[in-house]
Image (cartoon, rainbow, N blue to C red):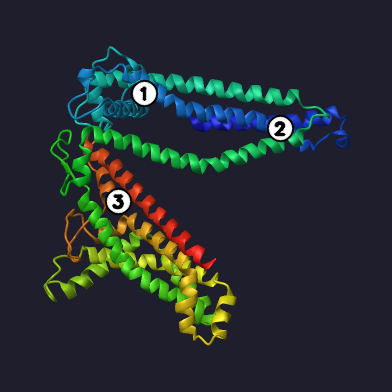
Amino acid sequence: MSLFWLIVIVLAIAVAGYVVGRARALASAGGDMRILHSLPSYYGSNVAMKTAVPAFLILVVWLLAQPFYINGTVSQMIPESAVGEGSSLGLVMAEVRRAATGLDNAVASGQMTDDFARNARADFNDITARLKDAGQIVTSQITQPVMRAAQSYRIMVSTGNLIMSIVVILAAIAGGLWGLRETNKDFRARNTVEKGVRFILIAAASIAILTTIGIVLSLVFNTVEFFRLYPATDFFFGTTWSPSFSGRGGSSELGIIPLLWGTFYISIVALIVAVPIGLFAAVYLSEYASPKVRAVAKPLLEILAGIPTIVYGLFALLTVGPLLLSVFGDGGLGIMKAGTAVMTAGLVMGIMLIPFVSSLSDDIINAVPQAMRDGSYGLGATKSETVKQVILPAALPGIVGAILLAASRAIGETMIVVLGAGAAARLSLNPFEAMTTVTAKIVSQLTGDADFASPVALVAFALGMTLFVVTLGLNIVALYIVRRYREQYD
């Protein structure tokens, strides 16, 4: 049974429980609602809640726990000889899961029967050939231990899903019967439902925290797996980025320093463009512009924030790059060799960041109390002096936050870099040379031909973890600056 239909069945049982519970409550009161402790809808909601919540809780826990159990069980079937040099048991398990998915797809497309896919005595070369003919195998070859483990993995997943469906449906029915049993005119249904809703809301509020923890753990586990295959010192201190997709990637040079340099260099160029323009625009809109001008200019400026980044990337590739090449290329100063360069991506990214800086800074400046402006004017200061000596210092924590938010946005940008800056990983001070960033290489490493048995694919997680730590450090610095200046102006 598919997950979709399982959820539909549980919801149907919950709806039926709501209807029956409401009717049972009215029947216990002889049809007179005034005798009931709570409204009839609360009795129905109590039955529906006790039907759906335990069932969905079991479903979520089962879906989280089953992969760990199956992976642990199947991994014990793989002999040590199947784990080659430069690989690991976790990476071989990735091949097993991929082969199991290929078997499922081949059965679904009619390339083979389910009995044939489950047959442990079937010739694995025959199975491999059929999977390749169906376009299901992405690795160059598949070994017998991997194929046998994939068959066992597939059987265990199918059995586990069947048991899960039965347990979840039984839990839903049991919960509904429990709710119906306690339904009577004296039952405090409203109190029970409100308490249950409270716990549901707490669980919903916890999803963001749990999601963050899950993201971090996924990065950590895969990063640790990468450093088991590739030296950490070579990764963090290497000055050459040269991944090789042959074999297991043993000849690859995966130094992150050129990528970090390109990331920070392009981000600095973007901030040099965005911060002055955005800040000056915010000061004008908040202090000098008339209400009519502000009502038109602010929405027009914020339209920039709604433009997809791929459009900015095309703008960099087709317009800004050729324009810079005509000025700084062979037809001009001769210092630029191609349209893709740090300056191209930095300028376009700076344009994209202007609304982030201007809109947030404008809101912060408008939040400065009017009494501070009036006091400055009362002491004889001009408008420009008030802006420079009173408003901007008071709004500085928020402005710094806006700038750092723009910096985080610049560091995480991908499409503008891919189309505007090129793909060369190099260390250079020339802003008119092509460079690349960490995010661009994460995309290229996960969309290439390497499988997850290779460090050149796992390196994407190490890059992501590094980027996460850098962004976290940036936010910590921002928090320190905000607190320091906030104490001064509170």
Q: Earlier in the sequence, mark 3 or mark 2?
A: 2
Looking at this rendering, what residue extends furthest in the top direction?
Answer: 121
| Residue toward you, 147 or 230 | 230
Closest to the camera, between mark 3 and mark 2, is 3
| Residue toward you, 51 or 151 | 51
The answer to whether mark 3 and mark 2 are in CB contact below 8 A is no
Residue 94: give x, y in percent of width and height: 30, 29
The residue sitting at 49% across, 84% down in the picture is: 383
Corner quadrant of residue 419: bottom left
Residue of label 2: 46
Say which quadrant the C terminus sits in.
bottom right
Corner quadrant of residue 334: bottom left
- Give the crowd class for mark 2: few <14, some 14-19, many >=20 residues within 10 Å: many
Badge 1 amino acid = Asn
The residue sitting at 32% across, 49% down in the picture is: 467
Badge 3 amino acid = Thr
Badge 2 amino acid = Asn
| Residue toward you, 420 or 81 | 81
Residue of label 3: 439
Q: Earlier in the sequence, mark 3 or mark 1?
A: 1
